[in-house]
Image (cartoon, rainbow, N blue to C red):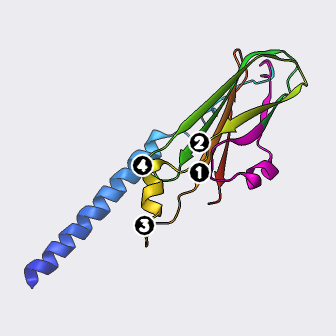
Amino acid sequence: MRGVALWGLFTSVAFLVTAAAFLLLASLGGDPESAPIPRADLSGTRERPTLSLKIPENQLERLEREPGQRLTLDLENGGDEDLADVTLSLDVASENTAQPHVRSYRETLEQLAPGETTSVEFEIDLSPSSTAGTRESKPGAEPQYREILEARASASGDASDVVKTAVLAS
């Protein structure tokens, strides 16, 4: 019993000595009167062209789990410069990551003028994969997995990429 008490006492003393050493080092390390880190001057930077992508919600509500579905994405150049080689891609993936079923669609616009808005229509396949279809036909099968839509717009030059994601209800 006496050994346990001594061990506890020495452990506590060692902890307090270590904590005091760290506090001493921390107080010696920083000079509170030193100058703060200067902030970057952003006034001279050029504003990047703005690319905007919209997935109309009313269209998402109409989509069903079958092939030949039409989805229109709206793309807008909100900047002051022409955007060249605007690429719009759409990936449709299953929520079930154990059996991935990804379909990809791509469209390229040669140019998008400042302030211009254009609509791009995709014909997409939302039918369940063949492995999911056989599993769902069995009694007591797992519920249908949702589909995840990821739309990505990018343009050559200084424009930032835009990504929009939607999860379709099953």
Residue at screen point 61% across, 42% down: 125
Q: What whole-number distance in Å separates the C-alpha atoms at marks 1 and 2?
A: 7 Å
User: Where does residue 32 sit, x and y in percent of width and height?
Assistant: 58, 41
Foreground: disc 3 or disc 4 = 3
Instruction: Say whether residue 13 is left or right of residue 74.
Output: left
Q: Residue under label 1, please give it.
A: 147
Please name the amino acid that badge 3 sits on: Lys
Q: Secondary structure at mark 2?
A: strand
Residue 134 is marked as none
Would you say 50 lies left or right of 30 here? right
Q: Is residue 56 left or right of residue 115?
A: left
The kind of residue on which mark 1 rests is Glu
Please tell me which of labels 3 and 1 falls first in the chain.
Answer: 3
Q: Report the Cα–Cα distance between label 3 and label 4.
A: 17 Å
The answer to which of marks 3 and 2 sits earlier in the sequence is 2
Residue 99: mark in rendering: 4
* Quadrant (top left, top right, bottom left, bottom right) of the N terminus: bottom left
Query: Which amino acid type corresponds to the residue marked 2 in the rendered image?
Result: Val
**Residue stretch in magenta:** 44-72
What residue does disc 2 label? 92
Question: Which label lies toward us, 3 or 2?
Answer: 3
Quadrant hosting residue 44: top right
Check if residue 48 falls in the magenta segment: yes
Label 3: few (<14), some or many (≥20) within 10 Å?
Answer: few
How far is disc 4 from disc 2 in space, using C-alphas? 14 Å
Tell me the number on the disc at residue 138. Answer: 3
- How many discs appear? 4
Q: At x 74% / y 50%, what residue is drawn? A: 60
Disc 4 + disc 2, Cβ < 8 Å = no
What residue is drawn where x is 9% and y is 83%? Answer: 2
| Nearer-N-terminus badge (1/4) | 4
Q: Seen from this angle, which residue lies furthest bottom?
A: 1
